[in-house]
């Protein structure tokens, strides 16, 4: 287990003073930090088709980016390159544990755990991110520079690398294993490896209005909703046929607002959308469905763990009526099992003790049997 060691401020003070406001170095935020995965294992993962990976290096002083899966790293030499893996939490249970200490921020805000291995001199270059990130230094060390928020001209250093022009640093540190650097969106930053080093970035996602609207429109189309027509049976004659008068403007606006104000529709969209995985999941596929009695027995001695990267949420307003959202879908269940469904959404692992009152509950066993069959949860000793 990783434990976040905050000595300068509490979680509440961090949220009040830094979150979305300014970057901060959390010196030794993880005491005695050990890499959850080795550089060799990371390089091995980047050979896999399903894993999103990138190699970034400079050739004759010009930035290069290659996308995995890779076949070999022989062309790279001993220094000046980085290997970046997206969504390592989907592929390494041990690495996913780095996310756990950040659960004081709700999970719907989380994006993924991005990991990089860099040789001395390796960097992805100076850039801006659109999300909040906690960069956790693993083995080795990196020099990180962070500039202030402001007008920073961005340019494509390579078709796949959006960089920013040189900036003045407000933070300039050599990070060692266990140090954590929090950077809010819009602050330019650059990390350059000083030795072979590992870095684990817990990233949080945000949504622009336009991306939400576009996803909402897709959701309405998929669910055959929102097909109501504008109706104006009480229209009066106009003298200005070119005018869209205030009443008509309001009529059109209401049409859209009615959909947004319909909480059944908009909650369903929000829950489904936010629970969608952005990266491929490594489903825990089982050979044959299990009988209910077998599940009850297994749960007497096994925890229920969710696979890495799975997103499962509930709304505080509707969970009591038996609705939650798992991997992009609305899922209904009997209201009698609400407390255990909350545990499944709040925690990556639900213990034998926590399951003791539920493991023989028919509704719960049926629910979990479907989830285990879908490969979302698995039994763990
Ligand atoms: C890195 O790990 O090298 C890049 C992380 C970041 O800048 O967000
Ligand atoms: Co970044």
Image: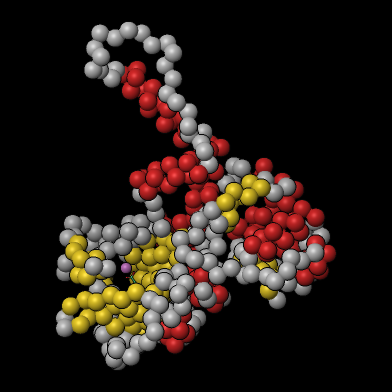
Q: How is the image coloured?
A: secondary structure
Answer with left or right where residue 277 lies relative to residue 144: right
Residue at horizontal 18 percent and vertical 64 percent from the top: 155
Q: Is residue 126 left or right of residue 72?
A: left
Number of numbered discs on residues: 0
Q: Position of residue 2 (x, y in %)?
A: 52, 75
Q: Quadrant of residue 23?
A: bottom left
Please say whether residue 169 is visible from this viewpoint: no
Quadrant in which the C terminus is drawn: bottom right
236 on left or right of 63: right
Tell me what residue is drawn at x 50 percent, y 44 percent. Answer: 222
Residue 261 vs 32, above or below: the answer is: above
Which quarter of the picture shows residue 292?
bottom right
Picture coordinates of residue 320, whole percent (x, y):
67, 44
Left/right of residue 268 with respect to residue 121 in the rendered view: right
Ligand 1's quadrant is: bottom left
Q: Nearer the viewer, residue 287 or 207?
A: 287
Is 29 drawn above or below residue 102 in the view shown? below
Instruction: Pinpoint residue 58: horizontal percent, then vertical percent.
Output: 22, 81
Taking the spot 25% from the left edge, 17% from the top edge, the residue there is 243
Q: Nearer the viewer, residue 7 or 244?
A: 244
Is there any visible trace of residue 279 in the rendered image?
yes
Examine the rendered structure and indicate whether residue 211 appears above or below residue 200: above
Name the spot of residue 377 as percent of width and height, x first.
64, 65
Quadrant for the N terminus, please: bottom right
Q: Residue at x 24, y 12 (%)?
A: 240
Q: Is residue 113 above or below residue 335?
A: below
């Amino acid at each position: 287990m990783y434990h976040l060691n905050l000595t300068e401020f509490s979680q509440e003070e961090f949220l009040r003073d830094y979150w979305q406001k300014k970057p901060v170095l959390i010196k030794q935020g993880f005491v005695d930090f050990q890499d959850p995965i080795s550089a060799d294992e990371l390089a091995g993962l980047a050979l896999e088709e399903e894993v999103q990976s990138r190699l970034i290096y400079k050739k004759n002083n010009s930035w290069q980016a290659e996308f995995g899966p890779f076949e070999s790293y022989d062309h790279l030499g001993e220094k000046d390159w980085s290997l970046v893996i997206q969504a390592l939490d989907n592929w390494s249970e041990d690495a996913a544990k780095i996310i756990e200490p950040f659960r004081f921020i709700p999970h719907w805000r989380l994006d993924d755990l991005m990991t990089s291995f860099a040789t001395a001199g390796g960097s992805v270059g100076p850039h801006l991110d659109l999300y909040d990130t906690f960069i956790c230094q693993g083995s080795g060390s990196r020099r990180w520079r962070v500039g202030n928020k402001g007008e920073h001209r961005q340019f494509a250093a390579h078709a796949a690398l959006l960089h920013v022009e040189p900036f003045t640093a407000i933070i300039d540190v050599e990070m060692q294993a266990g140090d954590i650097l929090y950077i809010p969106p819009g602050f330019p930053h650059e990390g350059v490896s000083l030795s072979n080093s590992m870095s684990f970035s817990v990233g949080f996602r945000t949504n622009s209005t336009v991306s939400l609207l576009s996803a909402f429109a897709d959701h309405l189309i998929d669910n055959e909703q929102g097909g109501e027509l504008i109706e104006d049976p009480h229209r009066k004659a106009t003298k200005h046929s070119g005018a869209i008068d205030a009443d008509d403007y309001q009529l059109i606006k209401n049409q859209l607002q009615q959909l947004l104000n319909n909480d059944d529709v908009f909650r369903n969209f929000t829950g489904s959308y936010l629970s969608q995985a952005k990266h491929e999941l490594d489903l825990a596929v089982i050979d044959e469905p299990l009988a209910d009695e077998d599940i009850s027995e297994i749960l007497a001695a096994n925890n229920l763990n969710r696979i890495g990267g799975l997103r499962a949420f509930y709304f505080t307003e509707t969970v009591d009526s038996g609705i939650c959202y798992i991997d992009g879908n609305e899922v209904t269940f009997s209201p009698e099992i609400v407390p255990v469904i909350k545990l499944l959404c709040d925690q990556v692992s639900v213990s034998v003790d926590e399951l003791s009152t539920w493991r023989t509950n028919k509704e719960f066993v049926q629910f979990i049997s479907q989830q285990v069959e879908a490969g979302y949860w698995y039994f763990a000793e």
